[in-house]
Amino acid sequence: MRSTGPSRAPDVFDERVHRMARIGIPVVLGLVYGYWAAANRRDGGPVTGWNILFGFVTALAFIVLCIAVATLAPRLKRELHSLTKSGFAGAAFGFLYSQSGASVLRSTVMALLVTAAIFAVFFYRYYTHEDAQGNRIR
């Protein structure tokens, strides 16, 4: 018979799951992003081979950059950490926005606004969850 003491719950999110998620999440996000960019570009028109190629190339670029940012950003100080992640998000938004037919100036302004908003959120989060040396407070 088993002991009646408290049992420990299984560790669902062990290191193996985290390793898989470090690649799996950017791949899924990249595929969604590539589809979205291709859909914006064709603007309701027919799906063509060039449109599919554009979507896959966009997805591949997003995946590579997302993994690079996720690897590099945590090694930086909180200001650069926030700027790196928000810059990536703003550039990704600006590119999607430009594919909808907006002007370069409007796409740039919108990307900068998104970058500034996301920077404020990330900086606040990192500032309130780190000590003066940049170590996480748990």
Image (cartoon, grey):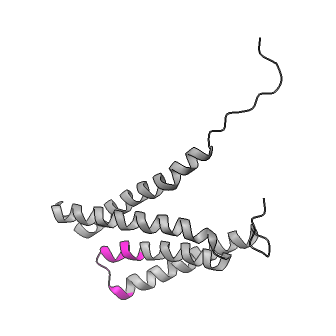
State left or right for residue 62 relative to residue 46.
Answer: right
> How many marks can you see?
0
Image coords of residue 78 (percent x, y): 67, 75
Was residue 49 drawn as part of the magenta stretch in this picture?
Answer: no
Q: In this view, does 63 lie above or below 100?
A: above
State left or right for residue 93 relative to residue 10.
Answer: left
Image coords of residue 95 (percent x, y): 37, 75
In which quadrant of the rendered view does residue 126 lie? bottom right
What is the residue that sits farthest to the bottom in this orientation?
105
State left or right for residue 123 relative to residue 4.
Answer: left
In which quadrant of the rendered view does residue 61 lie? bottom left
In which quadrant of the rendered view does residue 101 lie? bottom left
Viewer can see residue 39: no
Q: Which residue is at a point 57% across and 45% down the rendered structure image?
A: 16
Q: Which of 34 and 118 is in front in this view?
A: 34
Viewer can see residue 73: yes
Q: Which of 112 and 67 is in front in this view?
A: 67
> On the rendered image, what quadrant is the C terminus found in?
bottom right
Q: In this view, does 114 lie above or below 14?
A: below
Q: Is residue 50 above or below residue 84?
A: above
Image coords of residue 121 (percent x, y): 63, 72
Q: Which residue is at a point 79% across and 76% down the rendered structure image?
A: 132
Magenta stretch, residue numbers = 94-105
Was residue 96 drawn as part of the magenta stretch in this picture?
Answer: yes
The main secondary structure of the magenta stretch is helix
What is the residue that sits farthest to the top in this orientation?
1
Q: Which residue is at a point 83% across and 23% down the rendered structure image?
A: 5
Q: Which of 104 and 84 is in front in this view?
A: 84
What is the residue that sits farthest to the right in this orientation?
5
